[in-house]
Image (tube, coloured by chain):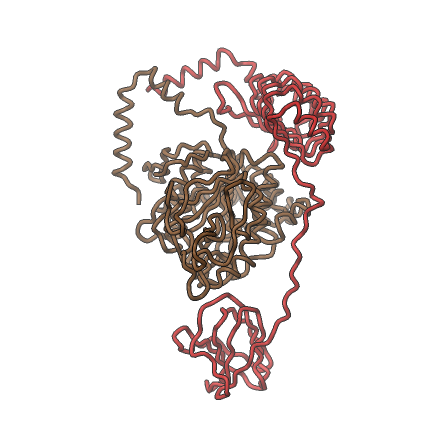
Chain colours: A red, B brown
Amino acid sequence: MIRFLLFLVLISNQALGQTSDQHAIESIKRNGGLVLPSPGGDNQWEVQFQLRGRNLSDAGLADIAKLKNIIELNLRDTKITSDGLIHLKELNKLTRLHLERTNVDDKGIAYLKDLTKLQYLNLYKTRITDKALEHLTELKNLRQLYIWQTDVTDIGIAYLKKRLPSLTIIKGIDLSTVIPIKKKEPKPEHDLKWLPNGGNEKPPEKSVTGEFTIIRFINKRNKAVKLFWIDYSGKPKFYGMINSESERRQNTYEDAVWMITNEQEMPLGYFVTGRDFARAIIPK
Amino acid sequence: MFSLKHTRRNFLRSSVGLAGLTLPTFFKAQAVSTPKRRKAKACIVIYTWGGMSHYESFDPKPEAPVDIRGEFKSINTATPGIQFSEHIPLLAKHSNKLAIVRSVHHSNGAHSGAVYLNLTGHQPEGQIKAKGRKNWPSITSVISHFHRPLAGIPNAIRMPYSMYDNGRQMAGESAGWLGAKHDPILMRTPAGEPYGGVNRYDDPALNLKLNIDRQRISERLNLLEQLDHSLGQRLGNSTAYEKLDHYRQMAADMLLGSPVREAYDLEKEDHRIRNMYGNHIGGQSLLLARRLVEAGVPVVQAVCSAGDLAGGGGDNWDTHRNHFPKMKNRLLPVFDRAVSALLTDLEMRGMLDETLVVFLTDFGRTPKVNANGGRDHHPGVYSLAFAGGGISGGQVYGASDKKGIEPSSGDCTPADIHATVFKAMGINPNAELHDQLDRPYRICDGKPLPIV
């Protein structure tokens, strides 16, 4: 009940004062914009064009500016130019303004000089130069300014910093200094040692779990062989046949013991895996 | 699983309380409960699957005996008094953006329970299954419930793999009782050298084929709509049908040119930016995360590790063997480069103050290095970190003791970490959500850490 009453009160408030706002909001929506109530306070708005409203042009900006209580405005990636920014002059409650990735240049920034509530101004990848910064010197509340990928120089930055000491200017990195990671040459595949059954060098009694690796078993015999994995308790586990002159790609782990037998399951020899990918050649 | 008793008690308490309020005090209460603070608009969850060692990352112990402090040295960061491990030198330069938490702890020594706890903020009860609808929802699902995207944009995306341990898929990555609509969509990062090790590809992942011609998609959709019409009549409004329809519509929206499709095409990114993140699926995933956030996706999770632990093999943080070479050569360089690139990129685009980045992992690693040169599971204390989204950087919350065994101050739990995330995202940690049967659950039992 209380909620319902509250709702009625809100509705009637809206109906009384804000028909002109409603027109502006409808126009914003027609242009693909999004109007959100700002958490900052009653009847304050956040307006976004960067997702669905990228076709917004200077003409559309005139309609937006009729909504006076815009606190945040995002025009990223839209088709606006400096000429359109004249309409923003009236939006003197703006605290955050996104103009990044538009064709805005120094001329347009002049229209922002009286938006003294601005705290955040994003101008990255616009056409501004040091000249634009001269228009920002009176924005005493400005705390964050973004100028990556513009022609603003260190001289301009120093100039503005001197006048607005509490401003942070984010210049970004120079992309020409990014060093790509060197591609590692693939290590040449080495061959696992063949330990013939009954030979001098004995394989371990069982496998131990370790890093993942891949082994290519290549059968050079003129007969098929059987492949067994010696498990963690020392028992052989059959994995498959490898025909004469053919190969099998096997996922395994380092320190695994693999046994090769003839078709009658008489052991012929063993391989012990290492960490690296390797070939295991079953000799003639 | 759901604590009816608890919620009912809360419910009774609050409704009795409400009855005693007069209208003016009700208004006052309302005014107090709507904070004027700015909130983050998007969240990127970076999950180091397997359990990242706190010693070799954010909480080195240079004073401890060598069998505990390990092989690595510690280095100074950009913030006086904060030291990191020597193998995250790039991240050390970003310490002014990071709030490190060195005192998280819990008691789940197994991956399954630890992942569930760190992703949902709730203790696992009984048998938890990856696709269980009784599970608590993942933090990504809860965030997207409160931060709804525009139509045609997914609620939440996770990439590049699901987490598996020896073939068993972990619970905690899905929406659980919030319902399939809120499941984050698994997306395969379309570029970058994959992590070494086993990755399971049997989970349905979304690959946006970028070369399908739109005319053909439209034609197929028309056909589908005709089919749907008759099918819909036959099936009525069954939930299964609705669910199917939801995904089909979303997939179609994405294919037919939502900003998400554009974001997915990493070829459109400046090659130097791609190089900055590193040509590795870890780096490219975080680049994709930034692009998705730009495209309006409210929450993205990137798993920084191979999909399957499979007994300790491959590139994951479950370093029971060869801990030091693996950390130094395979894991930390990717993590260091990719995460640093993300922070740089978000900052210079002016996105960092509205994008919360949170680092999660299973648990820390044991103080003593074992006989295989590894460190085992250690939920007794571990480190996590936050950046952006209104978090004050250049600070450390809490501490572990001299040997890194347990918290010595500011001890906190995964639930507190979740409460902190919710607060930064403008979500009341005590908010209630309802499951498919309309039963109420309080989303979080933790308290926000004083770092927001």
Judge whether A263 appears above or below B394 on screen. Answer: below
Residue drawn at x 28%, y 32% as measured from the top left: B10
Q: Quadrant of the N terminus of chain B?
A: top left
Judge whether B142 appears above or below A182 on screen. Answer: above
Horizontally, residue A100 falls left or right of residue A23, namely: right
Query: How many labels were placed on the picture?
Result: 0
* Residue B298 in sight: no
Judge whether A119 appears above or below B272 on screen. Answer: above
Horizontally, residue A106 falls left or right of residue B403, namely: right
Residue drawn at x 42%, y 46% as measured from the top left: B119
Please state the horizontal and vertical placement of residue B29, each as a whole percent of the image.
36, 21
Residue drawn at x 41%, y 40% as measured from the top left: B418
Furthest residue toward top:
A16
Please state the horizontal and vertical placement of residue B249, each as a whole percent of the image.
52, 42
Tell me which corner region of the image, top left, top right, bottom left or bottom right, holds residue B219.
Answer: top right
* Residue B411 in sight: yes
Q: Please tell me which residue lies in front, A159 or B248.
A: A159
Please state the horizontal and vertical placement of residue A43, each as a whole percent of the image.
50, 18
Q: Please tell me which residue lies in front, A154 or B266.
A: A154
Please state the horizontal and vertical placement of residue A226, each as a whole percent of the image.
49, 81
Judge whether A177 appears above or below B64 on screen. Answer: above
